[in-house]
Amino acid sequence: MAADNTKRVYGSIFDLLPNVDNPTPLVRLHKLVPSDKFELYAKLEWVNPFGSVKDRAAWYMIKDLEAKGQLSEQRGVVEASSGNTGLSLTAMARARGYRSRVVIPNKVPREKKILLKIAGAELDVLNDSVCPAPGMGDGSINLAKTHARAQPDRYVMPNQYENELNVLAHYETTGPEIWKQTDGRITHFFASLGTCGTVMGVSKFLKEKNPKIKVIAVQPSEGHDVPGIRNISQLDVSKLFDRSLVDDVMEIDHELAYRRAADLAQSEGLFAGPSAALIFEGARRVVERTPSGVGVMIFCDNVFKYTSNMIKHLPELGEGIDG
């Protein structure tokens, strides 16, 4: 059955994956925006079928491996992840009949580990950074590569940190969606730094359309525990980052990721995860000093995977919940 976006009827879960004709929503913020002359929109990537912006790159990588004949009932995927890519890859792989193994840092919230198990992942939990980092020994990325090398008949590693399809997915879907949804009026684009696929792909597309669009990357302060994102000092892990495609890099105190996540839920009705909330804080500061514009923020995922982290940083949220 062919997908019918007008009726929201789909032949399979994969037909829900976004494109220009079936984009993730763009929602305007009001109460928390300093100026009503600046239109600030959140692109709700948690509406992706497997819950995050990582669905886009994961699908491109799965399709590529299938086209190359590298996946089968005997051979699946292995990937190092802070959770979202691992979840997207696992859900897609299992739905298409392949195994999935995910190497994940122990500091990642328990909720994400449980979701990975629910999705059917074989899980390696390591004492690694909150985001997988390069290096020797038992690092997450190194172990994932080891699995792929040692058991080539059992695993292939898509490697989101080096795979150009991670960028292409956003160049061909996220960027065009934003351009169409804003009728080409976008003046500012806000994203975080992780594998850098999102910010690179969207920036490349938008700047081809209008070189004057400002692309702003928001990074957390050092010592952060916001899964999935990095600051510049941690970007050796990614082979995808091109500084020329980013106009500004803003550093935000990582503690604000959790405070702003609560603010977004309580004031805008947007249950954004901490990385999205950090992006919002960066965008909010730009709006304060910019007379007018049309800004789009990537809201990578929702807050439901981070409730334990939220209580850790905002202990008042835990008061009175146990009866």
Image (cartoon, rainbow, N blue to C red):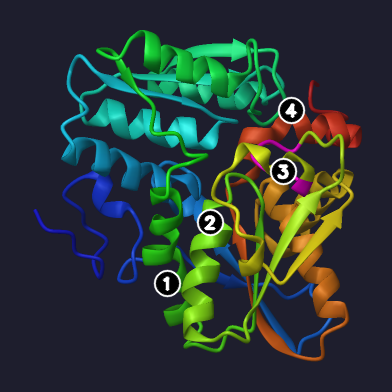
Name the residue type under label 4: Ser
User: How far is mark 4 from mark 1, CA to CA?
Assistant: 33 Å
Nearest to the observer: residue 120 or residue 31 = 120
User: How far is mark 1 from mark 2, CA to CA?
Assistant: 13 Å
**Category of crowding for the residue at label 4, using alpha-carbon neighbours closer than 10 angstroms: few (below 14), some (14–19), many (at least 20):** some
Q: Position of residue 318 (x, y in %)?
A: 84, 30
Q: Residue at x 69, y 19 (%)?
A: 128
Please identify, in this view, whether the residue under mark 3 or under mark 1 is nearer the observer. Answer: 3
Q: Quarter holding the C terminus? A: top right
Q: Is residue 297 magenta?
A: no
Q: Residue at x 78, y 33 (%)?
A: 225
User: How far is mark 3 from mark 4, CA to CA?
Assistant: 20 Å
Q: Secondary structure at mark 4?
A: helix
Please identify, in this view, whether the residue under mark 3 or under mark 4 is nearer the observer. Answer: 3
The residue where tag 3 is placed is 230
Tell me which segment is drawn in magenta.
226-232
